[in-house]
Image (tube, rainbow, N blue to C red):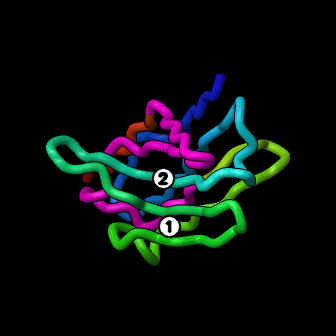
């Protein structure tokens, strides 16, 4: 059974940083296309960052320049380092894994940026 479990979300002030984690079980993250998405209330889900099986990294426009995606084989997890957070970054952040025609989603972790 595949599970993706996100963590690291929090309530923070503008300008602060957060590091989100997505721990995987049932798959090996380095063999999958791994992505972070976010979804704010009333808005469409949008891509934040991708790291492909070959290590290629692609960033969405929403947070480009303020985020870094990474992965770790030993912990079988991916991470999202987010800097200079703004109120517009308030959303649920979700982890996604794709390969061999299969897609898996985590339940998400909430990030709220308030002043």
SS state under label 1: strand
* Rendered location of residue 14, percent (x, y): 34, 60
Residue pushed farthest right? 74
Q: Is residue 90 magenta?
A: yes
Characterize the local packing of mark 1: few (<14), some (14-19) or many (20 or more) Cα atoms within 10 angstroms.
Answer: many
The residue shown at (49%, 61%) is 82
* Rendered location of residue 40, percent (x, y): 25, 46
The residue shown at (44%, 36%) is 108
If you read the primary sequence from the N terminus, does the residue marked by circle 1 or circle 2 appear first? 2
Where, quadrant-wise, is the N terminus in this rendering? Answer: top right
- Relative to 50, is 13 on the left or the right? left
Label of residue 115 in the image: none
Quick check: marks 1 and 2 in contact, CB under 8 Å? yes
Which residue is tagged 1?
67
Q: Which residues are magenta?
A: 80-107
The residue shown at (44%, 43%) is 94
Image height of 111 relative to 115, above or below:
above
Residue pushed farthest left? 42
Label of residue 36 in the image: 2
* Rendered location of residue 43, percent (x, y): 18, 49
């Amino acid at each position: 059974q595949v599970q993706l479990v996100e963590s690291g979300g929090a309530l923070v002030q503008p300008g602060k940083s957060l590091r989100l984690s997505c721990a995987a079980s049932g798959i090996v993250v380095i063999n999958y296309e791994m992505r972070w998405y976010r979804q704010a209330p009333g808005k469409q889900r949008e891509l934040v960052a991708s790291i492909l099986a070959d290590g290629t990294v692609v960033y969405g426009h929403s947070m480009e320049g303020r985020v870094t995606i990474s992965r770790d084989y030993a912990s079988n997890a991916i991470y999202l380092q987010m800097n200079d957070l703004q109120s517009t970054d308030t959303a649920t952040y979700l982890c996604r894994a794709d390969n061999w025609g299969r897609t898996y989603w985590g339940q998400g972790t909430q990030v709220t940026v308030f002043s």
